[in-house]
Image (cartoon, rainbow, N blue to C red):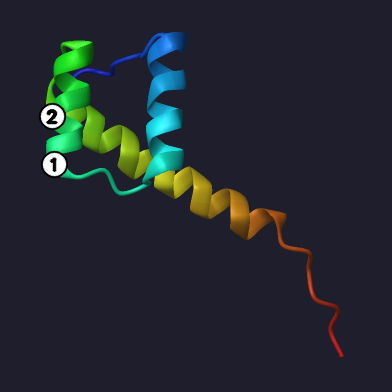
Amino acid sequence: MTRHSFTRRQRDYLEARFHDDPYASPARRREIAAKFDVAETRIKLWFQNRRQRDKLGRATSKPEQAAK
């Protein structure tokens, strides 16, 4: 599988769907894949990667607790 770059408009659409539900159902993924004319796997991976970026972003933005 080769790397796929989504257009700005597609990324904006994916971000909006992610904010609606970070865990898109298979039916929703198929709908998005059909809209973009890409494999459902690409959409699934985008959501997985986006959840990971969200998780890592929250972990690095927490202030360090002072050692006692």
Residue 17 drawn above or below residue 25: above
Q: Relative to the observer, which residue lies in front, 12 or 54?
A: 12
> At 19% from the left edge and 33% from the top edge, which residue is drawn?
29
Expressed as whole percent of the image width and height from the top left, the position of residue 56 reads 54, 52
Q: Amino acid at mark 1?
A: Pro
**Quadrant (top left/top right/bottom left/bottom right) for the N terminus:** top left
Q: Residue under circle 2?
A: 30
Expressed as whole percent of the image width and height from the top left, the position of residue 41 reads 15, 31
**Quadrant (top left/top right/bottom left/bottom right) for the C terminus:** bottom right
Report which quarter residue 27 is drawn in: top left
Q: Relative to the observer, which residue lies in front, 18 or 51?
A: 18
Expressed as whole percent of the image width and height from the top left, the position of residue 49 reads 37, 40
Report which quarter residue 10 is drawn in: top left
The secondary element bearing badge 1 is classed as: helix
Q: Amino acid at mark 2?
A: Arg
- Left or right? Give the position of 53 relative to 28: right
Q: Residue under circle 1?
A: 26
* Residue count near mark 2 (Cα–Cα under 10 Å), binned few <14, some 14–19, many ≥20: some
> At 38% from the left edge and 33% from the top edge, which residue is drawn?
17
Q: CA distance from mark 2 to mark 1?
A: 6 Å
Give yes or no for contact between labels 2 and 1 (Cβ–Cβ under 8 Å).
yes
* Residue count near mark 1 (Cα–Cα under 10 Å), binned few <14, some 14–19, many ≥20: few
Report which quarter residue 14 is drawn in: top left
